[in-house]
Image (tube, helix red, strand yellow):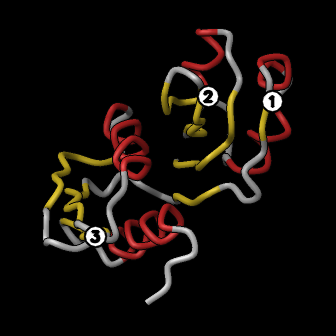
Amino acid sequence: MVVIDPLANALSTIMNCEVRRHKEAVVWPASKLIAMVLRVMQKYGYIGEFEYIDDGRWGKIKVQLLGRINKVGVIKPRYSVTYDQLISMPYWLRKHLPSRDIGIIIISTSRGVISHREALDMRIGGVLLAYVY
């Protein structure tokens, strides 16, 4: 099996399990980027606990679902944005989030994977990875 975008596969697995009202989702292959994105989602209360399972090959991540996700997905292509572009970010917010102050955009920065709100507070830019609301 060839996986082109593991992050997109992981988020679509979570979305599919959420739609079917499962209590947990198993994401594979696991990666550090997926774990960091899940940590941001957990911080904002979209998912519960998650754990890495070493299966001797790629690894898996078991994610506890809380039923709070309406939509989650990756942003492709992965646009690079500066802090100035983040300030005038209503275009990205309108395109990926349903309304003001609902949901987050997950950004990979030099200080790690964080939400767009934290990036504005830290006054840094980065690469847009995903959205969740």
Q: Mark 1 — residue?
A: 89
Q: Mark 3 — residue?
A: 58
Say above or below: 34 vs 21.
above
Q: Residue furthest front?
A: 56
Amino acid of disc 1: Met
The first of marks 1 and 3 along the sequence is: 3
Q: Which of marks 1 and 3 is in front?
A: 3
Please tell me which residue is depicted at 40% across the width and 73% down the height of the picture: 13
Amino acid of disc 3: Trp
Q: How far apart are marks 1 and 3 (CA)?
A: 36 Å
Please tell me which residue is depicted at 32% across the width and 38% down the height of the picture: 45
Q: Distance between the residues labelled 2 and 3?
A: 30 Å
Amino acid of disc 2: His
Contact between marks 2 and 1 (CB within 8 A): the answer is yes
Residue 52 location in percent, x, y? 18, 55
Local secondary structure at mark 1: loop
Q: Nearer the viewer, mark 2 or mark 3?
A: 3
Q: How far apart are marks 2 and 1 (CA)?
A: 9 Å
Q: Which residue lies furthest to the top in this view?
A: 122
Please tell me which residue is depicted at 23% across the width and 61% down the height of the picture: 61
Say above or below: 118 vs 35.
above
Q: Mark 2 — residue?
A: 116
Residue 64 location in percent, x, y? 20, 56
Local secondary structure at mark 2: helix
